[in-house]
Image (cartoon, grey):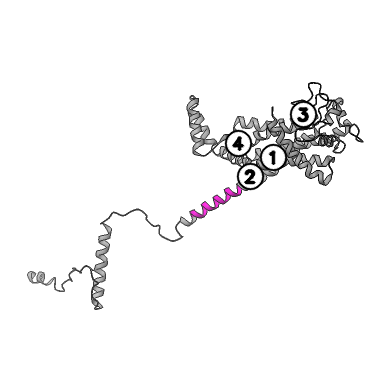
Amino acid sequence: MLDFIYYPVSAILWFWHQAFGYVLGKNSGFAWALAVVFLVFTLRLVLYKPFVKQVRTTRQMQELQPQIKELQKKYKNDRQQMTVEMQKLQKEHGFNPLMGCLPVLLQVPVFIGLFHVLRSFNRVGGGGGFGGFGGSHGMSVEQNANTANYIFSASDVQSFLAARLFGAPLSSYITQPMAQMEAFVHGDVGLPSKVAIAAVSIPLMIIAGIATHMNARASVARQSVEAAANPQAAMMNKLALYVFPLGVMVGGPFLPVAILLYWVSNNIWTYGQQHLVFGKIEKEEEEKKQLALERRAQNAPKPGAKPVDVRKKPAGKTDGVEDAVEDATDAPAAAQNGAKPAPGARPNTAKKRSGNRGRPNQKRRR
């Protein structure tokens, strides 16, 4: 039913096992463990760009929170209009809520695919996982060891069953029935002990729980005050901080060792990637702020300089007065120096004051 997921997942796991098996040995537990870890890294590398988009979407959502609250308050009695206005706001700012959860949604089928492929290495007693093999009763130990598992050949299946990580098979788990554990007996390799499985699983469970809590804590610390004050966000924060990490440790005894490895490596990658991406985005925002301040400083008047009036002056009012004053002052200076007026220049019509202007009045008084 989900072969379109199972085959690609098994192909990536097979590739990394071939690479590490060439160096460490085909039946090495470390080769298989590293194959699982690098399966996670391959997936997360493919999802790097969607993760960056998710981070930007989350930050943009926090910035739009005041406007969203305003719309919710304004259209609280009209749900249809509120939806229309919210879509309009999202379109104006290029905001897509789906990008906020896309990386998580894409990881879910991979997790299910890996879980199924790992369980399908051991199909003894109905241990084939979701699909099951050989009916409800499963296969015998011999049938299981000689049956291919998706892209893995029968010899790959035998290699996986014989591999041990500190004495624990990678598809074993603490609560596994003894009937299924018989599948791990292969050649000189005997039946694994529950103590060895618990000794590997329990530390991985604790590390997985702590890593999940630390990732959630780092994510919550980056939230804005408005976003953290939202009741729904506060509830999700509590779930991410305490319930999910506890769920990993409670469900750990039912999860194969390889799945716990997947969980730990996935959280370690997430923790490092978060710091890298958030640091890059914060640096970009700081550079934008710095550029804006520099532009503002360039446009501001220099100290002591008069501010320039950029408003348009009415035509024909000031220009004519200024020209008349310039002509009146320039013409006498040119005449005194014996220079001829420039071609096209307006003649100076200003009359000189008469020196005996007051004499007629003096005669009349006499």
User: What residue is rendered at 58% in x and 39% in y?
Assistant: 57
Q: Is residue 324 magenta?
A: no
Q: Mark 3 or mark 1, which is nearer the start of the sequence?
A: 1
| Residue type, mark 2 in image | Phe
Query: Element type at marker 3?
Result: helix
Residue 352, given in percent of the width and then of the height, sits at: 18, 71
Q: Out of 218 and 151, give the one closest to the viewer.
A: 151
- The numbered mark at residue 278 is 2
Q: Label 4, on which residue? A: 100
- Mark 3: few, some, or many residues within 10 Å (few <14, many ≥20)? few
Where disc 1 sits, the SS reads helix
> On the image, which quarter does residue 246 sit in?
top right
- Whether 288 is among the magenta residues is yes
| Gap between marks 1 and 2 measured at Cα | 20 Å
Q: Is residue 258 left or right of residue 45?
A: right
Mark before the other along the chain sequence, 4 or 1: 1
Residue 43, position as x, y percentages in the image: 69, 40
Q: Which residue is mark 3?
A: 251
- Cα gap from disc 3 to disc 4, whole angstroms: 27 Å
Q: Residue at x 64, y 45 (%)?
A: 277
Indicate which disc, 1 or 2, sits on the residue closer to the N terminus.
Answer: 1
